[in-house]
Image (cartoon, rainbow, N blue to C red):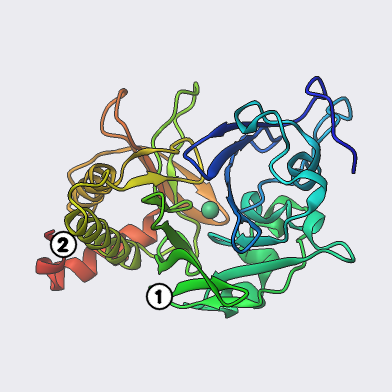
């Protein structure tokens, strides 16, 4: 592919997050605006991608670049010395799938064309969530769109330190089930940045607040445990290297770089209040056959939540029996 002029229209915008990593925001017809992260390695030569976005589905034909791969390989990025992130596609790809929802995997087909050198990594917590019923679990079936086909070749274990070509990437995987069983977080030890997918994010600046969402396959008890896991992991990193910058968090929507310990604390507190029945339901709607409630403490609240009522009821029953597990 030839380099594209900077005037080429595209549904992606990029800014540099840190020395090695870029945050790419996609405009899409679903209103998801996913944040995709691209980290460039020199040794081994590699482009690590965190998710692939919505694949340009249904966008106006006036937009010239809707393929994430074409964008990465041809579009000049001003914060990258006006070079594409992966000129001529020279770097192989390692795609970390934070989870298999459609707005994270629809860009995958561009990376599986013949001759592509792409490795797909996913959580080993419950592989069957991805290998079985992906059209349902990805929500593609619900939306009436084709489900991408891909083979995960790197099933990463909880706390696994990942390698590529037998070389350490200084990246660690954390299993964080809750939003979905396959939800994961990955920690870049070099940049001290933790990427948490859809586990949490802020409401955002848009006219409609973006809720932390749970599909019917979610689990609030697992979610609370995953927040504990994140909290203790972040605390350990901050304590181990007190002279280094505190760990930051990047999410798959809206929030790309905030203090990790603070945001996890705030989200944990909100969910404790929800489970304790201290946050009133602001509205309810039916989604995929289940009543889903919307929680937002105030108009200017930093977070809001949309969750099937059944998941909250399950969590309330569980923590009624195990109240100590709800205190952090
Ligand atoms: Zn999701």
> SS class of the residue under badge 2?
helix
Residue 54 image offset from top left, x and y in percent = 70, 45
- Left or right of 284: which side holds 68? right
For marks 1 and 2, the one nearer the N-term is 1
Tell me the quarter of the picture where residue 75 sits: top right
Visible residue check, residue 50: no
**Residue 287, position in %: x, y?**
54, 50
Q: Give percent across and percent down for residue 24.
A: 61, 38
Indicate the quadrant where residue 42 lies.
Answer: bottom right
The residue identified by callout 1 is 158
In which quadrant is the N terminus drawn?
A: top right
Q: Secondary structure at mark 1?
A: loop
Residue holding disc 2: 326
Nearer the observer: mark 1 or 2; the answer is 1
Camera-side residue: 48 or 63? 48
Horizontal placement of 12 versus 317: left or right? Answer: right
Indicate left or right for 206 with 117 as reference.
Answer: left
Q: Does ligand 1 reach within 8 Å of label 1's beta carbon? A: no
């Amino acid at each position: 592919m030839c380099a594209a002029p900077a005037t080429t229209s595209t549904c992606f915008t990029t800014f540099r997050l840190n020395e090695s990593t870029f945050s790419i925001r996609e405009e899409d017809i679903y209103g998801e605006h996913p944040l995709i992260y691209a980290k460039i390695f020199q040794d081994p030569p590699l482009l690590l991608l965190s998710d692939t976005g919505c694949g340009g589905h249904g966008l106006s034909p006036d937009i010239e670049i809707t393929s994430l791969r074409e964008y990465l390989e041809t579009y000049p990025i001003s914060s990258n010395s006006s070079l594409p992130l992966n000129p001529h596609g020279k770097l192989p790809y390692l795609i970390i799938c934070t989870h298999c929802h459609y707005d994270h995997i629809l860009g995958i087909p561009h990376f599986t064309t013949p001759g592509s050198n792409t490795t797909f990594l996913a959580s080993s917590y419950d592989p069957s969530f991805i290998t079985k019923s992906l059209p349902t679990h990805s929500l593609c079936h619900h939306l009436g769109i084709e489900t991408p086909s891909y083979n995960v070749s790197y099933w990463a274990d909880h706390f696994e330190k990942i390698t590529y070509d037998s070389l350490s990437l200084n990246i660690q995987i954390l299993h964080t089930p809750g939003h979905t069983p396959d939800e994961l977080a990955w920690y870049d030890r070099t940049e001290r940045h933790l990427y948490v997918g859809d586990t949490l994010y802020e409401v955002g600046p848009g006219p409609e607040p973006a809720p932390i969402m749970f599909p019917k396959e979610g689990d609030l008890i697992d979610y609370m445990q995953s927040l504990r896991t994140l909290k203790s992991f972040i605390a350990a990193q901050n304590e181990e290297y007190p002279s280094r910058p505190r760990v930051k968090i990047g999410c798959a929507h809206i929030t790309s770089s905030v203090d990790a310990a603070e945001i996890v604390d705030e989200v944990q507190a909100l969910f404790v209040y929800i489970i304790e029945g201290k946050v009133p339901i602001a509205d309810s709607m039916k989604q995929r056959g289940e009543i889903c409630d919307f929680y937002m403490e105030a108009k200017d609240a930093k977070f809001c939540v949309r969750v099937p009522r059944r998941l909250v009821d399950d969590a309330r029953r569980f923590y009624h029996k195990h109240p100590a597990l709800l205190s952090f």
